[in-house]
Amino acid sequence: MDKYRKKHFSSSQIIISGFLAVILAGTLLLMLPFATQEWGGASFMDALFTATSATCVTGLIVQDTATYWSFFGQCVILLLIQIGGMGVVTLAVAITVISGRKIGLMQRSTMQETIAAPSMGGIVRTTGFIIKMTAFVELLGAAAMLPVFAKEFGIIRGTWYALFHSISAFCNAGFDLMGIKEKFSSLTDYAGNPLINLVIIFLIVTGGVGFMTWNDIKIHKRNFSKYRMQSKVILVVTAMLIVFPAIYFYFYEFSGEIWDGTPVGEKLLSALFTSVTPRTAGFNTIDLNALSESGKMIVILLMLIGGSPGSTAGGIKTTTVAVVLLTTLSVFRRREETNCFGRRIAEDTIKYAATILFMYASLLLLGGIAISCLEKQPILTCVFEAASAISTSGLTLGITTGIGTVSRTILILLMYLGRVGGLTLVFAAVSGSRANISKLPKEKITVG
């Protein structure tokens, strides 16, 4: 009778299926004749790549968003960005709440996994907080940028541009509409504009910190000692990843002859922006090809780290890096346990962190090497593109638009894996398998 029982999907299976369904729906919408500026619609590959990039809030594109897609196509892209940024499950739970239906145990469990909540308690209330915060921050960002865009493009188009870039920045997507000035130019025309730079930075960091961290801040205000350990780690690591790379970019990268004549204020803004945007945002105000090889490697590392759990950002997450580093320090000090902020980190968390780091590093290298072999491009350039895809960052050195179908397929897979998470896919694949409670004899193996 077991085969007649109703099949129940795990939280991991629901998450990956939800993202896949949204990507396919977005692909079909972008293939409609009126989705492009020139009547006829996009090809399947272009539509699939764009829908995947938007839903996975990456920002890699094969067609310029402003000049290739119609207003309808841009609206579809923006909707996919919003769904991907907030999470498919979050929106589904929100719609269920609005419709007056009850939230079941499975939905609460899936929601907990999606937003990295410590428990299922208060999930509905937390969902309401996420929706309200998202709307408030995105509207605030749009209102702040409106004067600049309205002055340049007029009130109607300026409003659309302000809203589009605010949502794209908060969701860490990196899609822009500045191709009307120069195709694939991103925000390079605003490198010296303090308002646009600071607002975009604010939106990127706000979206990348994570909703549960903001919930902690909302509850405990400035009482840092009462924050959860995870929130403390996220805030400290985020601050370090903003400050130290910015110092490097300003004093090393932007001190060369190529930057002579650039005002000090613009250099400071560019250094700060370049330290923030690799953390899966995808905008750029400088030509990334002008960076040295060491500068590009730092950008790759920042992209790989990404944002924080339960945020709109991708990457291996700030907490993963923190756990790996703290575990390394505990080994150096010959301590049996890994501690942080007066708390002991669980062993399974350490195992997950090591696994995630290994999986992302492996996918990054395999993807970069494969693209380099297929496209006959320098390995650093291809690893950069692969890192941008797997971390859902969206930054590019300019080769994505010219690569072949196989390489594009590799980037699509990397974007999808990066957004749903490698462990989520593994857990979905092994869901339903029974845990092995028996233990084999222990034996030591020498490492290092």
Image (cartoon, grey):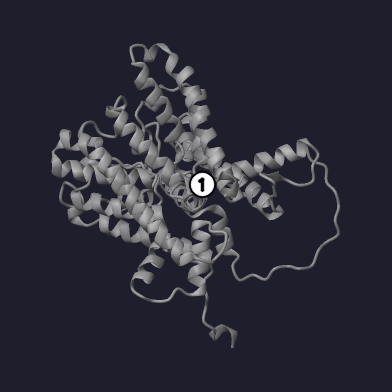
> Residue 90 is drawn in which quadrant?
bottom left
Residue 101 picture location, percent across and down? 39, 76
Q: Is residue 163 left or right of residue 364?
A: left
Up-down: is 105 above or below 50? Answer: below
Q: Which residue occupies 60% across, 65% down?
A: 430
Give the amino acid at mark 1. Answer: Ser
Q: Which residue occupies 27% across, 28% down?
A: 189
Residue 257 picture location, percent across and down? 40, 11
Up-down: is 265 above or below 67? Answer: above
The reply to whether residue 328 is in sight is yes
Residue 31 picture location, percent across and down? 25, 55
- Position of the N terminus, as image quadrant, is bottom right
Q: Is residue 182 left or right of residue 278?
A: left
Q: Which residue is mark 1?
A: 308
Q: Nearer the viewer, residue 130 or 60?
A: 130
Up-down: is 148 above or below 261? Answer: below
Per the image, label 1 sits on a secondary structure element best described as loop
The reply to whether residue 64 is in sight is no
Q: Nearer the viewer, residue 320 or 63?
A: 320
